[in-house]
Amino acid sequence: MKTPIVKVIFRVRDGEVCALFPEIPVTCNIYACQCYTIGTGHGTASVGFMYVSKPATPIEYRDLAGELARIGYKIKIGKRFTRADMRSRQIGINGELKDEEEGE
């Protein structure tokens, strides 16, 4: 089976680099997504984490990106959360939306 490509946003706060997976829900809260840090592993992050952290530089996230690759992730690096990311989390929580629910 082919490994899916996963969007990752690398952020840093208080010297700790965090990988946010904006398309992957981890709770029933649409404003939460999966995250990963070295040492802690997988966890939950609020999309509000973007406001209290800063973008990580390639040097800062190098080790974390390497660890993600070692545990099986194939990543594409993003810079911000999008409406499409929120829709992916919503679908992950509720399943595919019907056309009349989408409001489009």
Image: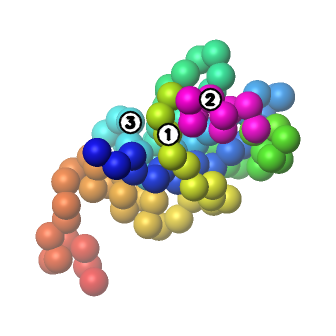
Which residue occupies 26% across, 79% down?
Answer: 103
Furthest toward the bottom, the residue is 104
Mark linked to residue 73: 1
Which tag, 2 or 3, sits closer to the chain's start? 3
Helix, strand or loop at label 2? It is helix
Q: Are marks 2 and 1 in contact (CB under 8 Å)?
A: no
Q: Nearer the viewer, residue 63 or 15?
A: 63
Quarter containing the N terminus: top left
Which residue occupies 68% across, 45% down?
Answer: 10
Helix, strand or loop at label 3? It is loop
Image vertical order of residue 77 relative to residue 10, above or below: below
Q: Residues within 10 Å of mark 1 (few under 14, many from 20)?
A: some
C-alpha gap between disc 2 and disc 1: 9 Å
Which tag, 2 or 1, sits closer to the chain's start? 2
Residue interval drawn in magenta: 62-70
Quarter containing the C terminus: bottom left
Horizontal relation, residue 92 to residue 11: left or right? left
Q: Residues within 10 Å of mark 3 (few under 14, many from 20)?
A: many
Furthest toward the front, the residue is 1
Mark linked to residue 67: 2
C-alpha gap between disc 3 and disc 1: 17 Å
Residue 69: percent from left, percent from top: 57, 36
Magenta span includes 7: no
How was this image coloured?
Answer: rainbow
Which tag, 3 or 1, sits closer to the chain's start? 3
Q: Quadrant of residue 87?
A: bottom left
Mark linked to residue 26: 3
Residue 86: percent from left, percent from top: 42, 58
Q: Quadrant of residue 66?
A: top right
Residue 54: percent from left, percent from top: 79, 46
Horizontal relation, residue 91 to residue 87: left or right? left
Instruction: Specify the amino acid type for callout 1.
Output: Tyr
